[in-house]
Amino acid sequence: MGELAQPIVGWTDVAALLDPVDTIALLRLVHEHGLRHLLLRYTRSGTPGTLALVLEAAGNAPGARQASPRVRSSPTADTSVAARRLRSGVGAPELASFRVAIVGCGAVGSAMVDLLFRNGVTRQILLDPDRLRPGNVIRHLADDRHVGLHKVHATRQRLGEVGLVVDDVDARVDAIGSPGSALLLMDEVDAVVDATGDEWTTALLRWAAESTQTTVVSAAVQREGGIARADRFPAPVGDYLPSVPLRTDLPAPGREHGCGDAVSNTPPSAVVAAATLGVELLLAGLSGVSATPASLLRVLQPQPDAPYDRLTMLTSPPAAQDPPVTGAPR
């Protein structure tokens, strides 16, 4: 339809933009062949668009076949990747060049995978040896359709439902269990996420980060979801917030029927909070933002001891300069 000077509000507006011969042909399609939908491509102030119209014939009364059909609009939407990426943020094209590994694709890990992917970090390596259980779906990105799959495959499938390409998401049923495997992973990526909640794995990845100067961000929930925390390694000595003391007065974890595993009382909202803190630190590191703190801690439920006794955000003293992301994007 070319450049429109004003909106189309009825059949008269459509006919005015068509050649008379085309208008007659279109009317015949409506009245004789049951044409009911019409897509009009146009531009408005140089921006392309598509208008969907629903056409209703005037009926079978004498002269109806020459009458103008009734017209009403139908919602339309651009389904392209470009349209979806408009909402990823201005940094998405740059973030697409980085490769990030997420170790641990449980509750916090799957949420971070999703947030990073939507923000533009589409080149990912997912590592986790576990399978998705029915009880996991309350806090996990995946849902009941994926129960029984390995968590890395369930998470990757959910990413595919966003409508974006997941060809660069590498799902590995694996774990980091030795210094050698940690160093090999560092050599593959620009940064690593530790969402395992496992002290041994976190210590191993921290050592590898400091050995290779590759950014590692560890995110976790503590005190049964009362605190969300994220730390970035490596960082200057003394720049981390102190460890949060354990509480012994919290209710005992629940027990899942069948396997009998202990189940944390952490609510889904705390999982999202921890994932968000981790993503903030990681994106700052990838983007080269200076003076980013090494630790972010958010109190989600007031605790009995200071400084966690009120809803607040705590940060470590910012470093003078973020450690650079090693090398060119992989």
Image: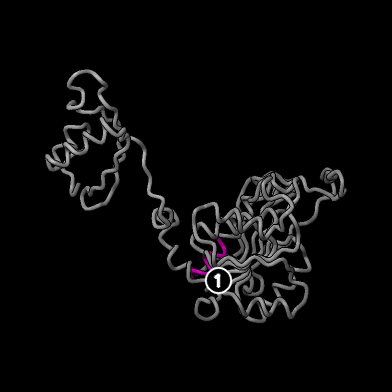
Q: Secondary structure at mark 1?
A: strand
Q: From the viewer's perspective, is residue 134 above or below residue 61?
A: below
Q: Which residues are magenta?
A: 280-290
Identify which residue is drawn at 56% across, 75% down: 323
User: Where does residue 34 sit, x and y in percent of width and height?
Assistant: 31, 32
Residue carrying label 1: 99
Identify which residue is drawn at 20% across, 32% down: 11
User: Where does residue 206 sit, x and y in percent of width and height?
Assistant: 69, 73
Q: Is residue 286 magenta?
A: yes
User: Quadrant of the rendered structure where residue 86 is?
Assistant: bottom left
Q: Is residue 326 left or right of residue 252?
A: left
Q: Main secondary structure of the magenta part?
A: helix
User: Where does residue 219 sit, x and y in percent of width and height?
Assistant: 66, 60
Q: Is residue 210 magenta?
A: no
User: Where does residue 67 sit, x and y in percent of width and height?
Assistant: 18, 25
Q: Is residue 302 left or right of residue 4?
A: right
Identify which residue is drawn at 74% across, 60% down: 197
Residue 73 visible in the picture: no
Residue type highlighted by circle 1: Arg
Q: From the viewer's perspective, is residue 173 above or below residue 184?
A: above
Identify which residue is drawn at 54% across, 62% down: 166
Q: From the viewer's perspective, is residue 111 above or below residue 23?
A: below
Q: What colour scheme has been applied to the protein in the rendered image?
A: one colour
Q: From the viewer's perspective, is residue 63 above or below residue 163?
A: above
Taking the view exactly as shown, the residue that stands out farthest to the left is 20
User: Quadrant of the rendered structure where residue 115 is?
Assistant: bottom right
Near-viewer residue (219 or 90): 90
Residue 165 visible in the picture: yes
Q: Is residue 168 left or right of residue 201?
A: left
Decide: few, some or many residues near mark 1? Use Cα within 10 Å; few <14, some 14-19, many ≥20: many
Near-viewer residue (254 or 206): 254
